[in-house]
Image (spheres, coloured by chain):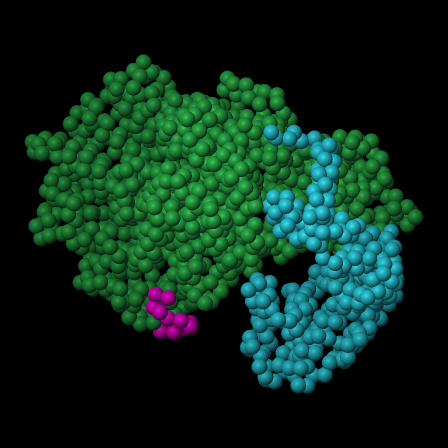
Chain colours: A green, B cyan
């Protein structure tokens, strides 16, 4: 193998980005003649003859040809281009999994040549198009620098005259300017078929691009004497900027293939086909489109991932083990589980048992299973092991979401889960090692349950406080190793060298699990060195004792890790970048130190920084030899996701935390680095998928009060918020997600400085900034369904901000009207949020604490006070507790009890109530009804005594209907009590409920609902629409009912949780028995999973699911008898009669 | 079958005037298959069609297939599928496949699906199955050749005929059939003193690599010279003299991790061993010296700052 190409082969065999640049001479490589060009010139420049064929270029087209009717000429040339067949050398080149292609050619052949069964093509003709995945190997971007002959639009088509070329040149420059950023300091650019003298892209313009790369990144192939003699190219060669090779690229690739260094076989992960999941003894292939789509969001745990690794030598096995130790903290190494490298911890058994019990349970839970613990306790490894274990049962499908810069897309996961269910998998276990808030896992779970998916979500988060952790769905990963775990570890490590187990035993007993993070650094690089390594150098125990003597931070349990760092001298090994210093946070730092800070600060939270952001922040001039840093210092890691986006991260968050503590000395400098990154954030491509925005949001969340360090950075919240304001106002990055974080930090800054009285004005100023920012964000947010959730979050934050203002005003003793104005604003925005996301608990929580502050602290009259309390109670009543997560339910009940107590104190004064009624206060009617009903939330069972009281309350409200008909709170209370009285169960009292309502009853329900929903938007909830739809249907207005359900389906996308698909009610006879129907099958889907039945009597086609009936091979026209009709938020559905309860 | 021969002759006749092309199909040495019993007829037909498309028509058929889309003759992809299924069926019928390997699994599934469409079962077992399959295969082949013929007609009348034919001729120019190598190999082996080697076996082992390499050469290459280089390189690689050291020895001696560097060092060791055969210890020492020199040479030109 030629040594000249060794660096190229090494690079191509790695995962690093590789770009191809094809010049306009690429079609001449075969025989010196461009047949396409010759063909064009033969038609449009007949006097051009064969003797000159080798001398012509695309410049000839511009300089000598008059095309006349350019439109027809383009059509003809484009048609000619379709007749081009890829030269055989190009067939070889196209087999490589390129990260991207740039070309100055204008023909259409490249798109065809590079399209394969495993790779799609994204052609780029215009600067207007920018992509979220510019380095995707499976969606290869081919950038036509000068446009393409096939295109018609001005900014996409290839020029056919000098003037058009001049016009196009600026676009070409912009397109080419993307190249160096896309190549990154890790990548390589291979150039073929380029001659500066004949190409439309001159040497100077290409040199501009090449100078944006590092030395040795650009390689020219088929380099002719002419190329060598070009003065500019010569200089670039002499400076080492570019390397010229005489051989063609295709022949070099063939050489690599022949010597076994390169393979033309596409990596399995890149292939769309051939991915199987075992179900029992069947192997089910994942459809290629589904595979591609799901992989955007999660890893599908296919059979290939669980296979035992190929037979390995002992040396290779040791390396693999060490690599597992290196990387398993941040991403799953699937082969390692089969190889037995993972240490099983005790808590994993509890985790597995809990998952199993959920899988076997009949009803779905709204709560995800959460594994929580400090960094370095083995959560990531445990979740990977859980995934493998579940999958190996061959009953359930498993999706795994590693820590990734972009969150998963719920629709992708929904599609996969549905496919899995249809394929026969009992459920999908979705394991998300996100280290994020529990609420995010809950939201995803509810979203999927709301679509009827049979799914369990398992997530990871930082160690929860004791009171938070007291729940059945939480599993703790403890920091200390048990004796049993120590024993397992000894056995594991002794596989590689028998003496290792004993050597480490005493260390294991002294330290917690952070030792496992340190193990990678303590073990020598090769197996052969193990014996010698530990004997030749100071033993680990001595290092640790020395470290203790040096008094490293005592609360940081990374003593072993610090010792390991010292042994490997990493902390002192930063010498690779230029030494010039820059000021950061008042300190002069070298480029290396700056790089460390930029990566370690996010790294301590497990975050990876997009490469573009790192380069932009450091500055191009300071990233020379960038890739060498990563070769020489292994605390950094670079990662590429499935779309080819590249990120720089750390080996382990714990190492990053240690380095931050040791090198940066505290939060002040950490915040400075965070700000340096944040100010360089850029929005590009599709907003929803922008990795930089996601990174910024994640970093801010981790720095904020809900991050793992709680309020460590509290003193800097205002500072960070100011940085975000600068990003917005000076850099023009107006992203609502970032603005939400900005406002939250401002509000939290207020909370942080609350103890200091002299800062009252400052605090209010901060809150004003927050409200202005949030209002701007709401204005900037496009009003479509995709932004619904974000809009709701902005509104909740706005409500919180006004609530905080209320608090401040009360402290300051401001006037009641000022206080009430802000309180009403808080309520208004909270209600708006609730309209958008009716199941979210946050708006209720905001109103709760704001109301509490108000009634305790404000000087308001009794009527107003009671009115406010009644508003809150009414809101509590409208909550569907069954849809809440356990955590939210606990907080909700606590609030209810708080207000129940407050209310008791107020309302027991009967004369106060009489006074209210006399004044005509609707709150008074509400409260009186409550007193009459004496409902006890703690005992929901209906007794005859409670029924009597409820009936009395209903009568009371009905007698005073005229007074209350404009009060939604009273109307809803009436509806609720009436329902309780008639059905003897609450509105949502379980599934498949039978209601003893006759037509008069339904008309009454509908009239109440109509009146209620006409009063205010906040009553136009999915729940109310659902009841209306059932009532309308029950009265026989089937078409009208279907119209309501159509609207409800659309709106209920915001409704999450099983409520959406749960069959809450069954159509009944007036006596309360289930109504039975018969009909015939109208339609069944090809896969037999769903269909429609024409129901006799009703004369409507109603959805049905054959699986519910245990029926297969149904045909149109086949009879179906004695079934019920149940209702969910999507509509009526045919249901087997045995489910209906009497 | 006669129809197939007729179409073959028609195709060859149509392209005969094209300079540098002259025929789509070379002569076949395989006898025309007999069709009875049907199962044997099927297997023979697959084999024959494979030789017909992929050997005798290697360049022409693959070239014409690229134009089916241009002239809207692709028939919803079924002609390309026929071309592929002949290859797959041949592999399926001739080789023992590994069902753990995804590629082989897919191939088996594809063939079984084709069987099911042709005779109603994934697993044909008797004449009742094989006869319709044979008919189906030959019917597809006829349709395939008719489409190729139509494609040639389209090219004939295409304004850009010369562009297309030039590209076709280029491909033929770079296609060197095995017999051309067979003519050179014995002479090369004699020249390098490797007369004991089996020339045909050597050609069979390396022909696909050589063919691929030649496809990427430009017009300026000389077949004789380049073929000779490839043959010599292959013959020398066949050298059965094994080194006295292994990769494990290299790993242990240099205390390096398994990987490309080990392979490179073994290559270097091979060069040293060819020059002078020696024992394990001496070879490792020489290898160390050679590595040191190479690293020194690399460091001198490298502008990276070496970490402490």
Helix, strand or loop for the magenta stretch, by majority: loop
In the displayed orientation, state which residue is furthest to the top: A758
* Residues drawn in magenta: A1107-1119
Residue A67 lies left or right of residue A711; in this view the side is right
Residue drawn at (68%, 34%), measured in percent from left and top?
A213
Residue drawn at (53%, 31%), measured in percent from left and top?
A569
The quarter of the picture where residue A179 lies is top right
Give x and y (percent) for residue A753. Answer: 33, 20
Q: Tell me if residue A1079 comes above or below residue A491 in the rendering.
A: below
In the displayed orientation, state which residue is furthest to the right: A51
Residue A161 visible in image = no
Residue drawn at (50%, 20%), measured in percent from left and top?
A585
The quarter of the picture where residue B68 lies is bottom right
Q: Quadrant of the C terminus of chain B?
A: top right
Q: Quadrant of the N terminus of chain B?
A: bottom right
Give x and y (percent) for residue B293. Answer: 73, 38
Q: Tell me if residue B284 comes above or below residue A1140 in the rendering.
A: above
Residue A834 lies left or right of residue A143; in this view the side is left
Give x and y (percent) for residue A78. Answer: 74, 50
Q: Judge by depth and name the residue closer to the eye, A70 or B137.
A: B137
Residue A1117 part of the magenta-drawn span = yes
Q: Judge by depth and name the residue closer to the eye, A1117 or A174.
A: A174
Residue B151 lies left or right of residue A1056; in this view the side is right
Give x and y (percent) for residue A574. Answer: 57, 28
Residue A464 lies left or right of residue A967; in this view the side is right
Q: Tell me if residue A783 comes above or below residue A803 in the rendering.
A: below
Residue A502 visible in image = yes
Residue drawn at (57%, 50%), measured in percent from left and top?
A316
């Amino acid at each position: 193998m030629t040594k000249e190409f060794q660096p190229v082969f090494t690079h191509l065999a790695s995962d690093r980005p590789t770009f191809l640049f094809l010049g306009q001479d690429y079609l001449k490589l075969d025989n010196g003649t461009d047949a396409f060009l010759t063909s064009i010139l033969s038609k449009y420049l007949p006097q051009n003859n064969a003797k000159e064929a080798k001398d012509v270029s695309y410049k000839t087209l511009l300089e000598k040809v008059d095309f006349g009717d350019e439109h027809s000429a383009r059509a003809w040339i484009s048609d000619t281009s379709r007749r081009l067949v890829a030269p055989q050398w190009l067939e070889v080149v196209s087999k490589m999994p390129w990260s991207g292609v740039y070309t100055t050619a204008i023909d259409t052949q490249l798109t065809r040549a590079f399209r394969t069964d495993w790779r799609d093509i994204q052609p780029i003709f215009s600067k207007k198009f920018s992509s979220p995945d510019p380095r995707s190997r499976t969606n290869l971007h081919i950038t036509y620098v000068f446009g393409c002959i096939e295109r018609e639009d001005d900014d996409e088509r290839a020029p056919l005259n000098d003037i058009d070329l001049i016009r196009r040149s600026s676009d070409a420059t912009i397109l080419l300017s993307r190249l160096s950023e896309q190549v990154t300091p890790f990548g390589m650019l291979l150039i073929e078929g380029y001659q500066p003298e004949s190409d439309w892209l001159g040497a100077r313009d290409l040199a501009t691009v090449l100078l944006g790369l590092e030395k040795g990144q650009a390689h020219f192939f088929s380099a002719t004497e002419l190329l060598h003699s070009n003065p500019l190219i010569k200089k670039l060669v002499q400076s080492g900027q570019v390397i010229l090779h005489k051989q063609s690229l295709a022949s070099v690739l063939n050489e690599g293939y022949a010597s076994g260094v390169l393979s033309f076989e596409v990596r399995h992960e890149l292939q769309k086909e051939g991915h199987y999941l075992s179900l029992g003894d069947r192997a089910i292939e994942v459809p290629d489109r589904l595979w591609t789509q799901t992989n955007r969001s999660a890893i599908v745990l296919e059979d290939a991932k669980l296979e035992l690794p190929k037979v390995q030598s002992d040396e290779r096995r040791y390396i693999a083990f060490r690599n597992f130790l290196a990387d398993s903290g941040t991403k799953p190494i699937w082969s390692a589980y089969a190889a037995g490298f993972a240490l099983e911890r005790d808590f994993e058994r509890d985790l597995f048992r809990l998952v199993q019990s959920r899988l076997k349970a009949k009803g779905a839970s709204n709560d995800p299973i959460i594994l929580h613990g400090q960094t370095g306790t083995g959560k990531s490894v445990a979740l990977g092991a859980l995934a493998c274990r579940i999958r190996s049962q061959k009953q359930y499908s498993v999706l795994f979401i590693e820590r990734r810069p972009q969150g998963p897309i719920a629709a992708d996961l929904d599609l996969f889960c549905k496919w899995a269910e249809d394929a026969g998998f009992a459920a999908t276990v979705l394991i998300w090692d996100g280290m994020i808030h529990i609420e995010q896992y809950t939201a995803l779970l509810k979203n999927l349950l709301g679509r009827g998916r049979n799914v369990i979500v398992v997530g990871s988060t930082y160690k929860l406080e004791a009171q938070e952790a007291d729940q059945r769905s939480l599993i703790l990963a403890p920091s200390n190793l048990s004796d049993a775990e120590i024993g397992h570890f000894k056995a594991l490590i002794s596989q590689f060298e028998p003496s290792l187990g004993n050597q480490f035993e005493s260390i294991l007993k002294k330290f917690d699990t952070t030792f496992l993070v340190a193990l990678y650094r303590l073990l020598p690089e090769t197996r052969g060195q193990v014996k010698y390594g530990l004997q030749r150098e100071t033993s680990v125990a001595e290092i640790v004792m020395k470290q203790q003597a040096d008094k490293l931070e005592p609360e940081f349990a990374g003593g072993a890790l610090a010792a390991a760092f010292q042994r490997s001298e990493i902390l002192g090994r930063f010498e690779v970048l230029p030494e010039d210093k820059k000021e950061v946070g008042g300190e002069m730092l070298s480029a290396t130190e700056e790089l460390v800070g930029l990566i370690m600060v996010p790294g301590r939270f497990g975050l990876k920084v997009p490469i573009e952001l790192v380069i932009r922040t450091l500055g191009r001039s300071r990233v020379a030899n960038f890739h060498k840093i990563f070769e020489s210092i292994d605390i950094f890691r670079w990662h590429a996701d499935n779309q080819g986006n590249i990120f720089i991260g750390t080996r382990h968050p714990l190492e990053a935390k240690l380095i931050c503590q040791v090198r940066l000395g505290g939060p002040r400098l950490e915040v400075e680095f965070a700000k340096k990154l944040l100010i360089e954030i850029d929005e590009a491509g599709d907003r929803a998928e922008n990795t930089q925005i996601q990174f910024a949001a994640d970093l801010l969340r981790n720095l904020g009060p809900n991050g793992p360090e709680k309020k460590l950075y509290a003193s800097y919240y205002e500072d960070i918020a100011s940085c975000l304001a600068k990003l917005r106002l000076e850099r023009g990055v107006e992203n609502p997600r970032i603005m939400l974080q900005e406002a939250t930090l401002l509000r939290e800054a207020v909370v942080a400085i609350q103890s200091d009285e002299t800062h009252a004005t400052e605090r209010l100023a901060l809150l004003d900034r927050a409200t202005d920012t949030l209002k701007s964000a709401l204005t900037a947010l496009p009003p479509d369904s995709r932004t619904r959730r974000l809009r709701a979050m902005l509104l909740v934050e706005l409500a919180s901000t006004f609530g905080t203002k209320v608090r401040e005003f009360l402290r300051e003793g401001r006037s009641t009207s000022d206080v009430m104005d802000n309180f009403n604003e808080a309520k208004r925005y909270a209600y708006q949020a609730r309209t958008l996301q009716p199941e979210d608990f946050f708006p209720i929580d905001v109103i709760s604490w704001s109301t509490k502050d108000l009634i305790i602290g404000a000087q308001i009259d009794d009527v107003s006070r009671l009115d406010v309390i009644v508003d809150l109670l009414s809101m509590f009543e409208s909550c569907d507790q069954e849809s809440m997560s356990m955590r939210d339910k606990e907080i909700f009940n606590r609030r209810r009890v708080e207000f129940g107590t407050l209310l008791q104190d107020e309302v027991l004064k009967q004369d106060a109530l009489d006074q209210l009624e006399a004044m005509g206060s609707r709150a008074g009617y509400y409260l009186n009804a409550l007193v009459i009903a004496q409902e006890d939330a703690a005992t929901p069972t209906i007794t005859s005594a409670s029924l009597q009281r409820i009936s009395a309350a209903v009568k009371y409200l009905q007698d005073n209907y005229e007074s209350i008909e404009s009060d939604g709170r009273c109307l809803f209370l009436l509806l609720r009590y009436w329902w309780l009285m008639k059905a003897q169960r609450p509105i949502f009292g379980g599934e498949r409920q039978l209601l003893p309502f006759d037509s008069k009853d339904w008309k009454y329900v509908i009239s109440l609902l109509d009146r209620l929903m006409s009063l205010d938007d906040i009553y136009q909830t999915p729940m109310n629409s659902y009841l209306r739809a059932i009532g309308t249907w029950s009265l026989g207005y089937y078409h009208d009912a279907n119209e309501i359900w159509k609207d409800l389906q659309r709106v209920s996308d915001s409704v999450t949780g099983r409520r959406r698909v749960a069959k809450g009610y069954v159509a009944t006879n007036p006596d309360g028995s289930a109504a039975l129907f018969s009909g015939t099958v109208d339609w069944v889907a090809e896969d037999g999973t769903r269909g429609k039945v024409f129901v006799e009597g009703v004369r409507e086609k109603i959805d049905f699911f054959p699986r519910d009936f245990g029926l297969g091979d149904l045909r149109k026209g086949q009879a179906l008898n004695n079934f019920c009709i149940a209702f969910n938020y999507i509509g009526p559905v045919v249901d087997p009669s045995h489910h209906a309860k009497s | 079958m006669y129809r197939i021969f007729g179409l073959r002759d028609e195709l060859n006749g149509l392209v005969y005037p094209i300079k540098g092309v002259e025929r789509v199909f070379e002569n076949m040495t395989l006898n025309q298959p007999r069709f009875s019993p049907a199962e044997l007829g099927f297997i023979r037909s697959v084999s024959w069609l494979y030789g017909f498309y992929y050997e005798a028509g290697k360049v022409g058929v693959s070239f014409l297939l690229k134009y089916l889309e241009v002239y809207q003759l692709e028939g919803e992809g079924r002609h390309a599928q026929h071309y592929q299924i002949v290859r797959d069926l041949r592999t399926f019928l001739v080789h023992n496949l590994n069902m753990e390997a995804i590629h082989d699994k897919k191939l088996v599934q594809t063939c079984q699906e084709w069987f099911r469409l042709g005779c109603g079962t994934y697993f044909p077992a008797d004449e009742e199955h094989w006869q319709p399959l044979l008919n189906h295969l030959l019917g597809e082949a006829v349709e395939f050749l008719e489409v190729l013929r139509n494609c040639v007609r389209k090219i004939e009348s295409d304004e850009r005929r010369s562009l297309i034919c030039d590209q076709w001729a280029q491909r033929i120019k770079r296609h060197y059939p095995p017999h051309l190598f067979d003519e050179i190999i014995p002479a090369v082996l004699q020249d390098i003193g490797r007369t004991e080697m089996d020339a045909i076996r050597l050609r069979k082992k390396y022909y696909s690599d050589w063919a691929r390499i030649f496809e990427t050469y430009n017009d300026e290459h000389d077949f004789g010279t380049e073929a000779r280089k490839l043959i010599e390189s292959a013959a020398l690689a066949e050298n059965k003299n094994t080194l006295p050291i292994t990769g494990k020895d290299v790993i242990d001696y240099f205390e390096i991790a398994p990987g490309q560097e080990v392979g490179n060092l073994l290559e270097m060791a091979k060069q040293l061993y060819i020059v002078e055969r020696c024992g394990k210890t001496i070879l490792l020492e020489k290898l160390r010296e050679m590595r040191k020199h190479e690293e020194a040479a690399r460091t001198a030109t490298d502008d990276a700052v070496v970490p402490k």
